[in-house]
């Protein structure tokens, strides 16, 4: 499971900027959904929906890009590591 973190940085760059931002702020940096809502001018319900949709898209992307597989309890059991993105950034 800890090795799955190898896939996350690249996967985040492959999401839309909005999805990447909300996941980075709320799930990685740990700001609250209420604070995110305030920063973005959203209602608390709107922020919660945005976060849930971004997490769902990240999960689908990780499943496809890193070939993440889950056990019968829904926990990550294995995946295929991907090399870091070596594409030069503009």
Image: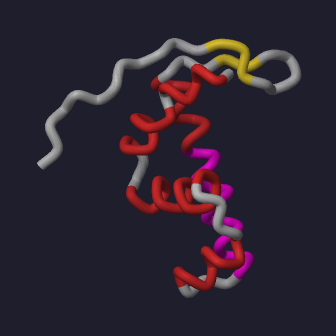
Is 83 positioned to the left or the right of 35 in the image?
left
Main secondary structure found in the magenta portion: helix
When asked about the image quadrant of residue 83, the answer is: top left
Residue 51 among magenta residues: yes
Number of marks: 0
Quadrant of residue 47 within the rendered picture: bottom right
Residue occupying image coordinates x 51% and y 12%: 80
Q: Is residue 67 above or below residue 11?
A: above
- Residue 65 position in % (x across, y down): 46, 25
Residue 23 is left or right of residue 81, and the answer is right
**Compared to 4, does 88 lie above or below?**
below
* Residue appearing at x 61%, y 74% in the figure: 36
- Residue 72 figure quarter: top right
Where residue 32 appears, x then y in whole percent? 70, 69
**Location of the N terminus (image quadrant):** top right
How is this picture coloured? secondary structure
Residue 8 vertical position relative to residue 83 in the rendered view, above or below:
below
Residue found farthest to the right: 73
Q: What residue is at 80 percent from the left and 16 percent from the top?
A: 71
The residue sitting at 38% across, 41% down in the picture is: 14
Percent of width and height locating residue 66: 50, 21
Give the side of residue 82 with respect to residue 78, left or right. Answer: left
In the rendered view, would you say 6 is above or below 78?
Answer: below
Q: Is residue 14 magenta?
A: no
Q: Nearer the viewer, residue 59 or 5?
A: 5
Q: Which residues are magenta?
A: 44-57
């Amino acid at each position: 499971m800890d090795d799955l973190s190898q896939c996350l940085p690249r996967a985040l760059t492959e999401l839309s900027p909005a999805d990447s931002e909300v996941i980075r702020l709320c799930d990685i940096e740990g700001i609250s959904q209420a604070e995110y809502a305030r920063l973005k001018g959203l209602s608390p319900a709107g922020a919660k929906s945005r976060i849930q949709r971004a997490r769902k898209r990240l999960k689908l992307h990780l499943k496809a890009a890193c070939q993440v597989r889950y056990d019968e309890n829904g926990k990550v059991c294995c995946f295929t590591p991907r090399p870091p993105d070596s594409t030069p950034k503009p």
